[in-house]
Structures are given as structure tokens and as C-alpha cells.
Image (tube, rainbow, N blue to C red):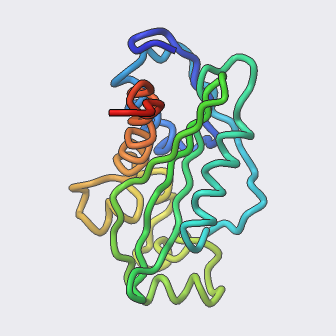
């Protein structure tokens, strides 16, 4: 697909926050004429732990959402990884094109309070949204501002993480010539 062309976009999630982030990122380079958001069951735990699971979840969501009507399929997956024993949350975006191109990008990461991470890692809660809802007495936070919205007092909402993860994945696709170049 050439830049600024009309595209159909399939997204492996019906979460409005993820859909908004993906569409906003693609809209920087293409005219998004069709969005097909589908529920994509990855078979992975609801709260991915480690970059391998996060990437696998994003990739599976992209692959499961691809159909003949799509120019691009995107999967976004959030999860935890550890840096020097401290838990961080990150979103990964995986993009697959109709022609088989693949790219991966990541959002900014933020530290997760140990009490929240421990409650999820020990199985008290199945995923971040459950723990955050309990801790802050809110409902549906994952479909709204997200945990990052609460932690930053709305200076950064969750859709922005999906946006940046997708934008970073698009870097390779909108610079195809540079990424396929064999010599300087």
C-alpha cells in the first residue's frame, strides 16, 4: 500500500481504547476507510507475563483478525515484564499486511506498583484491570483511561499507549525501502 492511500484495517480487539489508538496511528499515513474490530482469542493467559508472551499475543491477535477485506491486520497486547526485578507494563503492536509484511512496535513502559503486580502474579487477580478496579473502586478502566490514566492523573490515557505501539510498528512499513536496503 502506498502512503496516503485508502485502506481497510482489521484489529484483533473490540476494546475501544485499542481500536482508537490503532486507527489514530494509521491515520497519520493512510486514509482509513474501513475498520473491522474482531474478538481474537489468543489462548494465552489474560495477563501476559514477559515480552515473549506479550509479543505472541499481539502477533496472534493480528493473524486472527486478518481477512480478505483487510489491507492490514493489527494486534495489540499489553503485559508485564521485569527490569532489574521491577515490574513494568508495556503494549506491543503487531502489524501484518495483506502481502505478508510484518512489523512490531512497543509503547512507552511504566512501572507497576509491586502490590498490584504481586496480586496478579500470585493469582489473586487474573489480570491488571481486575486489580485496578479493586484498588481504586472503578469499573471498566481497561476500556477507558486505563491504569496509566489513573497513575498519571489523566496526563496520559491508555489509548495513547496503543497509538505509540502501533506508530512504532508502522515505522518499518512506511520506510520499506530503508528496511529492505542491502547496502549504504
Q: Nearer the viewer, residue 88 or 160?
A: 88
Count of numbered labels shown in the rendering? 0
Residue 16 drawn at (x, y percent) = 51, 41
Left or right of 103 in this view: 20: left
- Report which quarter residue 137 is drawn in: bottom left
Q: Nearer the viewer, residue 137 or 3?
A: 3
- Report which quarter residue 110 is drawn in: bottom left
- Report which quarter residue 77 is drawn in: bottom right
Location of residue 62 with respect to 138 vertically, above or below? above
Location of residue 4 with respect to 17 vertically, above or below? above
Q: Nearer the viewer, residue 163 or 155?
A: 163
Residue drawn 55% across the image and 48% down it: 76
Q: Quadrant of the C terminus?
A: top left
Residue drawn 49% across the image and 44% down it: 18
Residue 66 drawn at (x, y percent) = 71, 31
Q: Nearer the viewer, residue 171 or 183?
A: 183
Residue drawn 38% across the image and 38% down it: 167
Left or right of 64 in this view: 109: left
> Quick one: which residue is furthest to the top in this view?
5
Residue 103 drawn at (x, y percent) = 53, 40
Residue drawn 65% across the image and 22% down it: 99
Location of residue 106 with respect to 24 vertically, above or below? below
Amino acid at each position: 500500500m502506498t502512503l496516503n492511500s485508502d485502506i481497510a484495517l482489521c484489529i484483533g480487539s473490540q476494546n475501544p481504547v485499542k481500536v482508537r489508538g490503532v486507527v489514530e496511528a494509521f491515520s497519520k499515513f493512510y486514509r482509513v476507510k474501513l475498520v473491522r474490530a474482531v474478538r481474537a482469542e489468543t489462548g494465552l493467559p489474560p495477563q501476559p507475563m514477559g515480552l515473549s508472551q506479550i509479543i505472541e499475543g499481539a502477533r496472534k491477535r493480528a493473524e486472527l483478525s486478518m481477512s480478505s477485506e483487510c489491507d492490514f491486520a493489527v494486534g495489540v497486547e499489553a503485559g508485564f515484564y521485569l527490569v532489574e526485578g521491577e515490574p513494568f507494563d508495556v503494549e506491543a503492536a503487531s502489524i501484518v499486511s495483506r502481502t505478508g509484511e510484518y512489523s512490531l512496535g512497543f509503547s512507552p513502559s511504566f512501572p507497576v506498583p509491586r502490590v498490584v503486580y504481586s496480586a496478579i502474579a500470585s493469582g489473586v487477580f487474573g489480570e491488571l484491570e481486575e486489580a485496578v478496579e479493586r484498588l481504586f473502586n472503578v469499573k471498566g478502566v481497561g476500556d477507558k483511561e486505563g491504569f496509566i490514566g489513573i497513575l498519571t492523573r489523566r496526563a496520559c490515557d491508555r489509548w495513547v499507549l496503543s497509538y505509540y505501539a502501533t506508530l512504532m510498528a508502522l515505522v518499518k512499513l512506511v520506510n520499506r525501502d530503508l528496511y529492505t536496503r542491502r547496502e549504504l
